[in-house]
Every structure is written in C-alpha cells, then in structure tokens.
Image (cartoon, grey):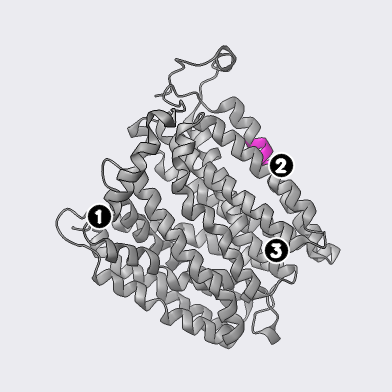
Amino acid sequence: MRSDQGTTPTQRTFQGMKRFPWIYVPTTYFAEGVPYMVVNTVSVIIYKTMGIPNRMIGLTSALSIPWIIKMFWAPLVDGYSTKRRWIIAMQLAIASAFIFLAFAVSTGYFFAVSLILLGAVAFASATHDIATDGFYMLSLSPEEQAFYTGVRSTCYRLAMIFTSGVLVVIAGMIQARSGGASSGWTVVLCIAAAIFFGLAIFHAFYLPYPSTDRGRNPAGGGAVSTFLPAFRSYFTQTGIVSIVAFILLYRFGEALLVKMAQPFLLDVSRMGGLGLSTETVGFVYGTVGTSCLLAGGILGGWLISRCGLRRCLWPMAIALNAPDLCYVYLAWAKPALGYVYAMVAAEQFGYGVGFSAFTVFLMYRAKHPYKTSHYAISTGLMALGLTLPAMASGYLQEYLGYYKFFILVCFLTIPGMMTIWFIPKGEGDDLSE
C-alpha cells in the first residue's frame, strides 16, 4: 500500500528513510484534535475571560457547522490532488489562522474578527479530517488500520488534554502575572501556530507517498458519482426515523451542559458560578476532566467488546446522563475545590463511557459498500445534534441561572434515552449479542 511507484523525482529523493506509521499516525491525529478543541472548547474560555456574555458564547456553537456539512465537499478532497497535499496545505492554513487570531485578541474588534478566523480554522480542520482519514486508509493495509485504531484515538484524546489543559493553564499563568487575559491568549495561540507550522514541515518530509493516493478527475465519476447513491441508501434503511432521532437526541442534554460548564466554573459567585481562575479551570476541566474522559472511553470500548453493544447501550446511556446531576449539586452547594475536581471527573468519565456506545452504534450503521460515506453522514448528524442545543444554551442559562439550567439539562436527557426503545434491534442490525 505504501509503494513508491508513480512518485516524482523530487519525491523519490526523500524515499531513503522508511516512514513508520507509529510516527505519522500519532502526529496526524494529534493535528486533528487541536483545532477542534480550540474552536469548540478553548474559544469558550477565551470569550468568557474576555467578557463576552453567555448568550453570545452559546451562539458561537455555529462554528461547528463545517464538521456537520463536511460530507458535502468530501468528494472534492477525494477528487482533486492527493490526501498528502491536502493534509499539509490545511495544516499551513490552520497555522496562519492561529497567527492572525493571536494578534486579533488585543484589538477592539476581537469578537467579530475571531468569529471569522475561528470559522476559517473550523473549515480547514474539517477538510483536514477528511484528508487524514482518507490518507490513513490509503497508507495502511487493512491489518495495520485495525492495529493503529487505538493509537489514533489515543493521540486525538491527548490533543484534547494538551489543548484544553496545558494551553489553558499556560494562558492562566500568564494572565495571573500580567493582570490581563489577552496577553495569555496571544502567547498560547502563537504556540499553537508554531506547532502547526512545525507539523506541516515535518509531514512534508515524512508522510509516505502511497501509490493509491492520486486525485481522481470528478468529471469522470469517482467519489462525486457515489455520493448520491450513498446518501440514498443511508436514508432508506430500515428504521431510519428512529435512527436519526437517536443520533440527534442521545447527547441532547450533554450538548447543553458542555457549552456552559466552563463559564460556570469561571463565573463569580454572585453570577451563580464557582469563581475559579483560568489556570484552575485548565487543570479541572482540561487535564483531570479530559483524562477521565479518556479513561471512560477505554473502559466503554472494553465493555462493548466483552458484552456486546445491545447489553451495554442502556447502562452506558445512564452512565452518560446521570452524572449531569453533579453540576446541579455544584451549582447548589458551591463546595470546596476538591469536590469540584471529583464532580467534573465523574461527569467526564461517565461521558466517556456513554460516548463509546454511541460511537460503536454509528460504526454499525455504516453499511457496505458505502461505509465511509455512511459514517460521514452519521457524524454530520451527530454534530448537528450537538450544535443546535449548544446555540441555545447561553440564552437558557442567562434566563434560568446555573442551578435551574442544570436541572433542565437533566430532564432533557430523557428523550434521548427513550429513543433507545425504538432503534432497530432485528436480525442483522449489529446490535444483537
């Protein structure tokens, strides 16, 4: 699969060293995770520390739209140029956007400019995801793809910890010393830009040249011609209404909670929050919370492999939603910091367990011969199910206050769990034991 046949003389000058997947798989999937976390998680903390109200922060969930609709331009990535070039080009684009964003933080037009730049990061990141997943399948044999699945998932999670933990802690430390939020975010975003420039240069030299990684001519068919049949086959499968309802509603409550969790930790007590510093939030949510999310995901995957999805789906749905009660307690009791660590860790651990069942369900809904397209459609619907409630979260929180808002979140987890009763469980649906 990693043949050098068809490469140019310039490419062959770098064929002396062997390209090891255990090096480039981790680096490409780390590069997948960082921009996603900046757009969807770190931006929330940036806006909160810069004084943006919660109702506006909630609306920034619209920045997730590129991940929802990426299925529509995936054929272009498949049809023009190579996945290798797309990866490098998008990493350079993300690095450039981070640089501009770093210097925009201290301007008077920060909010408007940041939305444009974060939108550009989101589009480039979604395109990078398409190219990276395609390159993964082209550069590795089926056996290698299976072997490195855990590696790519782990490195994506490490990117989450690094971005929402390490970078936020650095920003908080600089903020505490300088007395201003903008200086810390400028430094952190410059660090992110430097990492992506470095990744682009490294991948330009190190990524292999798979002989099958060649852009096809869309005029001649290829990926574009398969999109409509794939789309039609997905939405005509048995039980599609209940399947779509499950995908959209399974994480409905969590989608509301996750957007307001960090503003809650940062807001002062008179606003109903816990009044933690940016540095502390980086430790609580970005490091401890994300580590527990990773641990929960590993446990969830192991349980499904042992017991099957059908047995695990209900218990894991409860594991996902029941810990939301922790935020009700935090908003009511305002406990000591040790309890905050424990409660956030419990909620994120449960989220990791519950999300494992959801991910496996999406994989099972991807049917031959359109597995890639079906999975892209499912993940697009998943992103839509997260984005719509998250956009309303800020308005709901400001209207209800944090305590009542978190109670509402708990009640809104019920519809998603109820859809489990209706999703197909017949023969051949991959939910059987």
Please give the label number shown on residue 194.
2
Q: Disc 3 or disc 1, which is closer to the eye?
A: 1
**Mark positioned earlier in the residue sequence (3 or 1):** 3
Prevailing secondary structure of the magenta residues: helix
Left or right: residue 428 versus residue 34 is left
Q: Tell me the residue that label 1 is attached to.
A: 236
Label 2, secondary structure: give it: helix
Q: Amino acid at mark 2?
A: Ala
Which class describes the residues within 10 Å of circle 1: few (<14), some (14-19), or many (20+)?
A: few
Q: Quadrant of residue 206?
A: top right
Asked whether 171 or 401 is in front, the reply is 401
- Name the quarter where the C terminus is drawn: bottom left
**Is residue 413 located in the magenta-colored stretch of the structure?**
no
Who is closer to the viewer here, 415 or 28? 415
Farthest front residue in view: 219
Q: Residue at x 63, y 34 (%)?
A: 200
Q: Nearer the viewer, mark 2 or mark 1?
A: 1
Secondary structure, mark 3, is helix
- In primary-sequence order, the first of circles 2 and 1 is 2
Q: Residue furthest left?
A: 427
Give the labeled residue for mark 3: 46
Q: Which quadrant of the figure contains the N terminus?
A: top left
- CA gap, disc 3 and disc 1: 43 Å
Mark 3 or 2 closer to N-term?
3
Q: Amino acid at mark 3?
A: Ile
Q: Which residues are drawn in magenta? A: 193-199
Mark 2 neighbour density, 10 Å: few (under 14) some (14–19) many (20 or more): some
Residues marked 2 and 1 touching at CB (< 8 Å): no
Residue closest to the eye, 38 or 376: 376
